[in-house]
Image (cartoon, rainbow, N blue to C red):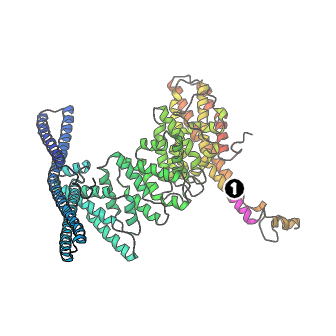
Amino acid sequence: MTDVPFTPLAGSPPQMEGLSAAAARAAAALATTRTDLDRLRRGLEQHRSDAVDAARQVTDALGAEADVVGTVLRHAATVLTGRAADLASERREAALALERRAVATARLRHAEADEAEAWQQDALTADPATTATRLWEARRRAEQACQDVAAAEADWYRAREAKESGSKLAAARLGGLDRTGALRLAAASGSSMARYRAGWDRGVRLAAMLATTFPDGSREDQAAARADLAAAIRAAGDDPVVWTAFWQHVTPAQVARVLGSGSGAPVQELAAGLAAWAGTATAAEQREQGAALVAALGDSTLGMDDRAQLVAGLFAGLPLPVFVGAADALGARHGHEPRDDLFVAGSGPVVVAVATGLSADPDAALDHLAPEDADLAAVRIRSWFGRVPPDGWPDGGAAVAGLLAVAVRHGSASSDSATQSRAALVVERATPELVGHRGLLGPHSAVPDEAARHVALAYEPYIPIFEEIEDPELDDGTTPGTATCVQPRLDAFELRRLIGVTSGTPVAADHWLGAADRYVARVADGMDAPLDASGRTAAAQDTVGDTGVVAGATRSPILLEARADQARTEAATGWLNTGLGLSTATARPAASVITTGAGLLLPPLLPDQVAEARETVLRDESLLRERFAAPLHEAATEADAAAGLDPEAAPARLDQLDPDSHAIGSRFDERYGVYSDLRRTLGDSS
């Protein structure tokens, strides 16, 4: 409340005393409640049961809460009582100053009036000596009155300053009492209110030290200032009250600006302190802090690497709402506006930290990637999976791919079809972003095995529709379905690229083949269901067709790389070079078969790398067909035996399920050949 100069000071000591009395009464009531709770607790000690144990826990929690709140109320009552008395004194001093000012002002007016009268009478009497005396006396009284007015005004200002400083002091004494979480921690450790206040004040001073440490001046001055601040932070210890006060008064941007350059930043201490603050904050405050951590990266690429390393370190040990707020902020930061590669790359450590933290909660991961707002969902999907720097993320994309896997696996496994649909939409939207030019699986870098594992896990629930993606006519609805959840709409070319890119190593390819193994095992478990022979054959055909897609796509890099190597070799030899064509056109036949004048090896003698790759892919075809078809045949055989069917009739029922049968072999080989690029081109129905 602002005080207008030379008016009574604002404020009401009686009202403040009333508030103090109310706080004291509430504290007394809580003390009575605490006594009653203790009596109840002692009564419960005589009984033993789960219900009584639960009642004891509730009683203990309520008692602890009553202690904390009662302590706060008593302290507040004491502060308010003292402040009310001081305010009354300050108001009295101001009122007396106003009275003195009014009296002095009246005297001044009388003196000025006397001076004016003296001038008028002088003009009539023409007595200079008398006039001079009267004028001197009037001016002397006026000067004295002016001095008294100034002194009274100074007294009023002093009273106002005393009021302001007293209010600030009272506010400081009440500071931190709204952080009930910190108070609970202090109470649980047996800390007194005085010790709590001392810790809070220490945290405020530490925050003030950071606020006055500017990264300006010479390099030596900057380093010395940061070293002093780092030493003070390390010396702060692990008192949660200190750190709650510190993070209550500073922002991550301030911390990054001062300490986010050079080396020696006390990241562990700051992170532990931030975790202590988070333990006393509401979920909304935690989400806001997550957004603030992302904002601390700033918009300048200069020094962003150092700031990002510092900010990423601050996420250690923070609760889920912080990661939710940070993830939302990252989506807005990278998804809405195009950013240059340096800007996106600079935030890499934070992207990894946030993706890792958000992945710890599958519900939160799915909620983030699949919000109700379709536009917002598109922005977030693009941010995470379609805006990757040329060199990839620091961990090769494993954390971001893990976020996708956690969200999709959780949603697809839900019993709620709406949740399944949300997960399917995530995959549907993410696939083109993942394999896009700037996508997580784009041409920027190799995909590490861990990231490939997460991608395979994310797409595993949707293997049952892989075959129909390239040939929708196969989905005629006449055969028993093998899908267990709502399926996404995928593009065959994007799917082959996605599987191929994430099968670049034997380990990565095994992740996909293992997913196909698990799919086959689930179908095989259902082979003992009451299906007729044709229905069982159709289910097996669908399954091997889907696994043929996976198997073929995992082998597609072999042929793709072979063709690329062949093209590079042919280009190096000048086979497609016009100059070489001209040189061989005039050569004698005998010479043209072996060399040209340039001494280059001609195409007939070049190694056929593509043919060698095709042989490798062909050899794998029969092995993989046996791998995925044999379990279905074996399951059907065991089911027939368990059902007591005539062994003589069994071959007729099982022949169609043999891995080498036309029904199974042709279905697998067709998909394998298409997706491995071994036979016809993907999308070509000829």
User: Could you tell me which secondary element the residue under label 1 belongs to?
Assistant: helix
Q: Quadrant of the C terminus?
A: top right
Q: Position of residue 149 (x, y in %)?
A: 20, 65
Left or right, residue 492 beside residue 239:
right
- The answer to whether 48 is drawn above or below residue 449 in the figure is above
Determine which residue is flagged by label 1: 563
Secondary structure mostly taken by the magenta-highlighted segment of the chain: helix
Total numbered labels: 1
Q: Amino acid at mark 1?
A: Arg
Left or right, residue 556 beside residue 153:
right
Q: Position of residue 611 (x, y in %)?
A: 71, 53
The foreground one among 187 and 257 is: 257
The foreground one among 7 and 591 is: 7
Residue 661 within the magenta-colored segment of the rendering: no
The foreground one among 489 and 125 is: 125
Q: Residues within 10 Å of mark 1 (few under 14, many from 20)?
A: some
Q: Position of residue 280 (x, y in %)?
A: 28, 49
Picture quadrant of residue 544? top right
Q: Residue at x 18, y 44 (%)?
A: 64
Q: Which residues are magenta?
A: 565-574
- The answer to whether 387 is drawn above or below residue 648 in the figure is below
Residue 569 within the magenta-colored segment of the rendering: yes
Left or right, residue 589 beside residue 56:
right
Picture quadrant of residue 247? bottom left
- The answer to whether 515 is drawn above or below residue 268 in the figure is above
Q: Name, please, the residue furthest toward the front.
A: 125
Q: Residue at x 40, y 56 (%)?
A: 293
Residue 625 visible within the image: no
Q: Residue at x 63, y 49 (%)?
A: 556
Residue 542 visible within the image: yes
Picture quadrant of residue 272? bottom left
Q: Residue at x 34, y 74 (%)?
A: 224
